[in-house]
Image (cartoon, rainbow, N blue to C red):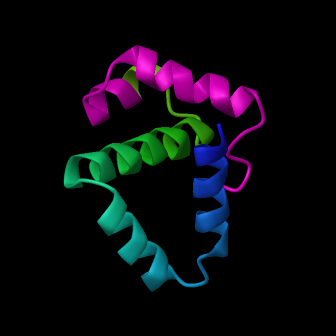
Amino acid sequence: MSNFNDLTRILTDIDSESEMTNFLNGLLTPKEREEFVRRLDIIKMLKKGMPQHTIAEKLGVGVATVTRGSKEIQMGRFKNIA
């Protein structure tokens, strides 16, 4: 999975918000950007204690998608997201 490691290195080498925005706008389609934002919203809502079914209904996603986010939080990911 060296390509994923390359992506990680490139992302961590980006120094500014504007450079990151430019990079992500070039890399992702509008639909992909929306999906990333939606997944981030799921994590934020879960961390605030919102019920999974409420999140799914509010964001128009499946409960399984929200559950996946919950499992990732339990695995210790997303510590830097409030």
The residues colored magenta run 55-82
Residue at the spot x=40%, y=47% of the render?
A: 36
Residues 20 and 61: in front is 20
Q: Main secondary structure of the magenta part?
A: helix
In this view, 30 is above or below 68: below
Residues 79 and 6: in front is 6
Q: Position of residue 77 (x, y in %)?
A: 71, 40
Residues 40 and 14: in front is 14
In this view, 66 is above or below 78: above
Instruction: Find out whether residue 18 is within the magenta segment.
Output: no
User: Is 81 displayed left or right of 65 in the figure?
Assistant: right
Q: Residue furthest right?
A: 76
Q: Position of residue 10 (x, y in %)?
A: 60, 66
In the picture, which quadrant includes the C terminus? bottom right
Q: Position of residue 44 (x, y in %)?
A: 53, 46
Q: Visible in this render: residue 42?
A: yes
Residue at the spot x=28%, y=49% of the render?
A: 34
In this view, 18 is above or below 27: below
In this view, 72 is above or below 79: above
Residue at the spot x=78%, y=36% of the render?
A: 76
Residue at the spot x=70%, y=56% of the render?
A: 80
User: Is 39 displayed left or right of 47 in the figure?
Assistant: left
Instruction: Find out whether residue 74 is within the magenta segment.
Output: yes
Q: Residue furthest front?
A: 2
- Please tell me how many numbered marks the rendered image carries: 0
